[in-house]
Amino acid sequence: MPDYTPTPADKFTFGLWTVGNTGRDPFGEPTRPAMKAPYLVQKLAELGAWGVNLHDNDLVPISASASERDSIVAEFKQALSDHGLVVPMATTNLFNDPAFKDGAFTSADARVRAYALQKTMRSMDLGAELGAATYVFWGGREGTEVDAGGKLLDCLGWFRDSLNFLAEYSESQGYGYRFALEPKPNEPRADIFLPTVGSALGFIATLDKPEQFGVNPEFAHETMAGLNFSHAVAQAIDAGKLFHIDLNDQKMGRFDQDLRFGAENPKGAFFLVQLLESSGYAGPRHFDAHALRTEDEAGVWAFARGCMRTYLIFKEKAQQFAQDSEIQAALAAYRVEDAELAQLTGTFSPQNAEALKARTFDRAALGARGPGLEQLDQLTMELLLGIR
Ligand code: GLT
Ligand code: MN
Ligand code: MN
């Protein structure tokens, strides 16, 4: 039996905030001690991860002096080079500090918006220094509980102005970042702006440099919105906008759980891995999740190992799916092609339109056809359950 041990070639990454999560929640104190960033780097490398991602303040406390910052960053860089880990993605913490309680780029207070820009530029400098190529924007505080402030249209404009400004800043510094917007429907705000992948894709088209912007969809976030994550990812891929991805799991209709990848909805996780692996997506497979609050440090590493193993197991299952002759026959039977119709519908011409309008279809036969999806899905289940 393969041992499903990851290697850097698998491009697995974790956020410092994920394996570094101490188990604090709105109702309880931390259940495990904080671990230092260089130690997390060492452990992730031992487990076979490729990289580590961070917010500015995961590494450098918000009140650190310039010299404290420099020594923390130097120590972190040393750990990266000692253990061979890269930093593919960086982001800004624009949600923790009370200054951002009513939004960062969408605060009604122009001073907060300006501070958010300043903090993000400094954080982009840090990410560039660490070699990050992707810069994520998760607007956790960009939202409202009440709309009495009447700022909905202004917020979209402020958000757009900020992103346009930061894209110019990246260019002026030669950072070459690709920016990825990460949607989430709610939590910590009651309603977060740009709540789904579809909303983010629509917004990106309104930016000055849309080619620099894509999305960072998260399994849990689309699930919280009651949506099918693979469908959202497919739409991002189709638009050429899948710049990054946050893998985890989530029970639908609950608070943000950030469960171990595949823990709740293994079938959904399988279809996602199948989609990603067949799509040519070459970016990081980032796990944005954390160990259960019940766990100690050993549980944290079991969690991290589990995310990667489950991904690799599903990757192997996707290969089996592609090689299973019964499944492939069922798939082939599911699709019906017709060369003559392809001619008529492939390209518009007045003649094709007339010929198509004149054509007779056996509507009853079309409606009566059984496409075999029950059988195909059961074969898939049996493959996933390990009996094929
Ligand atoms: C936060 C959030 C995540 C985002 C991170 C990036 S921070 O933990 O829940 O989904 O990806 O800012
Ligand atoms: Mn995320
Ligand atoms: Mn999340």
Image (tube, rainbow, N blue to C red):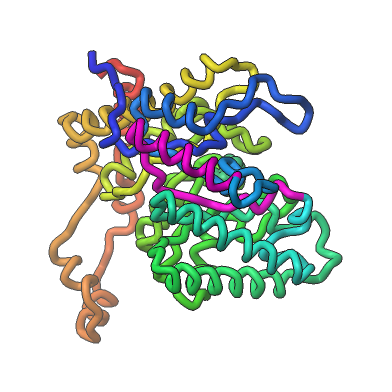
Q: Nearer the viewer, residue 301 or 218?
A: 301
Residue 204 lies, in percent from the top left, at: 50, 68
Name the quadrant of the N terminus: top left
Q: Is residue 372 left or right of residue 87?
A: left
Magenta-highlighted residues: 68-97
- Which residue appears at 68% of the width and 55% of the height? 192
* 207 w.r.t. 17: above or below: below
- Which residue appears at 53% of the width and 69% of the height? 166
Residue 372 painted magenta: no
Quadrant assignment, res 314: top left
Residue 250 lies, in percent from the top left, at: 56, 34
Q: Nearer the viewer, residue 62 or 164?
A: 62
Residue 39 lies, in percent from the top left, at: 48, 27
Please tell me in which quarter of the rendered image ligand 2 is found: top right
Quadrant assignment, res 20: top right
Q: Is residue 258 visible?
A: yes
Residue at the extreme right of the image, as rendered:
148
Residue at the extreme bottom of the image, as rendered:
350
Q: Nearer the viewer, residue 232 or 178?
A: 178
